Amino acid sequence: MKVELAKSAGFCFGVNRAMELVEKQIALGKSEPIYTYGPLIHNEEVVASLEKKGVHVCESNAEDKCPIVNENGGRGTMILRSHGVSANTEKHLKNLGFDIVDATCPFVKRIHKTVNEESKAGKHIIIVGNAKHPEVEGIIGWCNEPPFVIENIDEADRIPYAKDEKVCIVSQTTFNSKKFKEIVDYITKKGYDINVVNTICNATEERQQAAGELAEAADCMIVIGGTHSSNSRKLYEICAQRCENTHFIQTLDDLHLELPKSVRLVGITAGASTPNNIIEEVQNYVRNEF
């Protein structure tokens, strides 16, 4: 039996950058507290590891409860996670006295810039993605008027703009690229005057394509990712469509695998917030146990 890891899997550029920025703050050895605004990434193992190193999660709407720690009204360091935050949230955190370290993924920052400029130019903004995802919530906060958020073709039928009004379409960086194209094609056929900015990041597209190709050939697929990770769930959806025997796990403890002798190829992929040590642990287990 062969065990194969997808060509693109695990930490992406944005997550790597966020982790490096946090480690730099830890290395400074400040006496003042370090917070992340919400979990740094959608991986409970990583968040728990950072907590042991003194990096605390500050949930949104709880930032004013963080104590003032010096005579200048400072509250310590607040790290903005890779998903990004709204312009108002960033301003609010500064006003509360936090030293801000911006770990927003550069691909997400590009979307902030796009929707800000396009909405200032008078265009309506359509965001393709999950309205409750923190990345999308942050993008919404950079628009100059309330945008319209859609996640599927059915919701595209409820677009509130007249067809002679200019519209700019962007996407959550981790959205399924195939679904994004289908939604854009559908809106185009309805006759809207649209400008499409494909903001799905290259790492996401490469990871989805690599996972899909491996799942086509595999007898069994294992997708490793955080339970709240959007990009990991998308990988699971893609793999499950191509390989009936697909498992979604967060760590090796979640893997309860029974493989018949007929299985010749087990494929493994991992979301953008899955660290290498967990991927290696799963790989070694499958290789040694079966």
Image (spheres, helix red, strand yellow):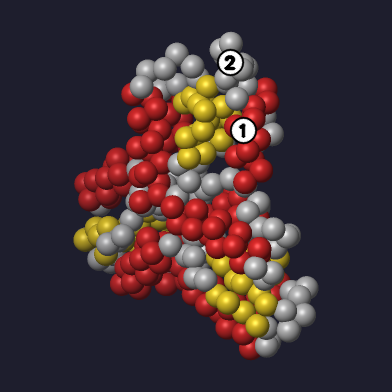
Determine which residue is flagged by label 2: 72
The numbered disc on residue 189 is: none
Q: Is residue 219 above or below residue 134?
A: below
Q: Residue at x 40, y 49 (%)?
A: 14
Q: Residue at x 63, y 38 (%)?
A: 91
The first of marks 2 and 1 along the sequence is 2
Locate residue 68: give its quadrant. top right
Is 241 on the left or on the right of 8, as rendered?
Answer: right
Q: Residue at x 60, y 39 (%)?
A: 90
Real-space Cα distance between discs 2 and 1?
Answer: 15 Å
Q: Is the residue marked by circle 1 packed among few (<14), some (14-19), or many (20+) residues within 10 Å?
A: some
Locate residue 37: give its quadrant. top right
Which one is nearer the viewer's eye here, 21 or 174?
Answer: 21
Image quadrant holding the N terminus, namely: bottom left
**Residue 7 in sight in this render:** yes
Which one is nearer the viewer's eye here, 95 or 75?
Answer: 95
**Residue 251 in sight in this render:** no
Query: As drawn, which residue projects farthest toward the front?
Result: 121
For the residue marked with disc 1, what is the amino acid?
A: Leu
State yes or no: discs 2 and 1 in contact (Cβ < 8 Å): no
Determine which residue is flagged by label 1: 93
Assign a secondary structure to mark 2. Answer: loop
For the residue marked with disc 2, what is the amino acid?
A: Asn
Q: Looking at the picture, how far across and down is residue 42, in whole percent?
A: 49, 44
Q: Looking at the picture, how far across and down is residue 24, in whole percent?
A: 35, 30
